[in-house]
Amino acid sequence: MTTVEEALALLDPKIRNRLATGAGIKTEVQPTPSTGLNRALNGGLPYGRQVLIWGSKSSAKSSFCLQTIGMAQKDGKLCAWIDAEMSYDESWAQKMGVDTSQLIYSQARTINEFVDVANALMDAGVDLIVIDSITSLLPAIYFEKDSDELKSLENTKQIGAEARDFSNAWKMINYANNKTKPTLILAISQARNNINAMYTQQQPTGGQATKFYSSTVIKLFSSESENQAIKGKIQIGDKLIEEKIGRKVRWELQFSKTSPAFQGGEYDFYFRGDSLGLDVIADLVDTAELAGLIDRTGAWYKLDNGEKIQGREAFIKYVRENEDYQEQLRSQLNG
């Protein structure tokens, strides 16, 4: 029987230099701000691949990506933000933990511009690229031939134009990735109704190729109903008034090539108050409880020393103030 070494020795040297055995091939991952999602992803989002993050409006998709960038920057990663919605806000990015002075920023209005910028950034060695969002990118059918002049609206109606352009775009980006280094591409997409379904069914934009070339597909959704709102006291003048300061956001891992799919969870997201963005500590507590690492009976949380704390908010406050206990929970979850 021919061995691997013998088979490789028979190959042309040019081909042989491009081959190796399957042993030792590892994929670096980028943790997200959600402990629960990281656990479902086997550590985080995979570098060298494309990840699709889509969902309903106001489900904090952009903020989730900004917090992920902030974490990546702390690990020395070079990150870029391609703004297709013209919605980037520097002050909010800073509140999400982003070092904006070290963030590469670019605007893109068309699918062609997105591909050109993304390929150039990958060639330059950027580690993480976010496109916000692919829904806002215009396909070539909207423009006059060999021009950046927009056509009249009645001349832009062509079925499948956007999906066709994205199919080619993802092929080009997939080809360019990993040439210089493995780059993590986070593509944000808004939700759209599928008109072919007999009942209301949502789907991301960009056609089937967008999902096909995504190694991971994450859906974020949040209801506008009153029971999903998080309320808190806000100082207005000399009065404390109860206002909506956040909401529950549910995540669903719909597809993943690097971890088991069809998992879900929920975290708290705050847009007002002292703690903004995804509540990392509350998510850590909820994930640890689901993993059986926290002893809770009814409303009472029991500590290792036998002490009891009543209520979720009080227990989260205790964990937030106790960094050693935070690290203990993280190490137990990672172990």
Image (cartoon, rainbow, N blue to C red):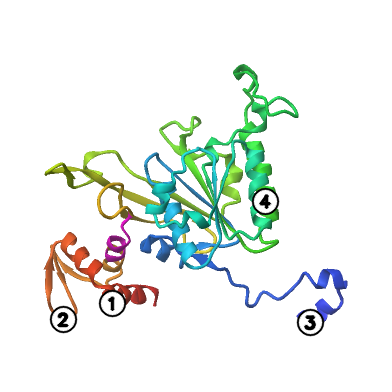
Q: Residue at x 58, y 39 (%)?
A: 207
Secondary structure of residue under mark 1? helix
**Can residue 1 be seen in the rendering of this structure?**
no
Residue ID for mark 4: 119
Residue neighbourhood size for the residue with mark 4, other residues' Cα within 10 Å, grouped as few (<14), some (14–19), many (≥20) = some
> Magenta span has 284?
yes
Residue type, mark 1 in image: Asp
**Can residue 22 be seen in the rendering of this structure?**
yes
Mark in the foreground, 3 or 4: 4
Checking the image for residue 305, the label placed there is 2
Mark in the foreground, 1 or 3: 1
Horizontal and vertical percent for residue 283?
31, 61
Residue ID for mark 3: 5
Q: Nearer the viewer, residue 245 or 28?
A: 245
- Stretch in magenta: 278-285
Residue ID for mark 1: 324
Secondary structure of residue under mark 3? helix
Pointers 3 and 4 in contact (CB under 8 A)?
no
> Magenta span has 289?
no
Residue type, mark 2 in image: Asn
Q: Is residue 86 left or right of residue 330?
A: right
Q: Nearer the viewer, residue 131 or 289?
A: 131
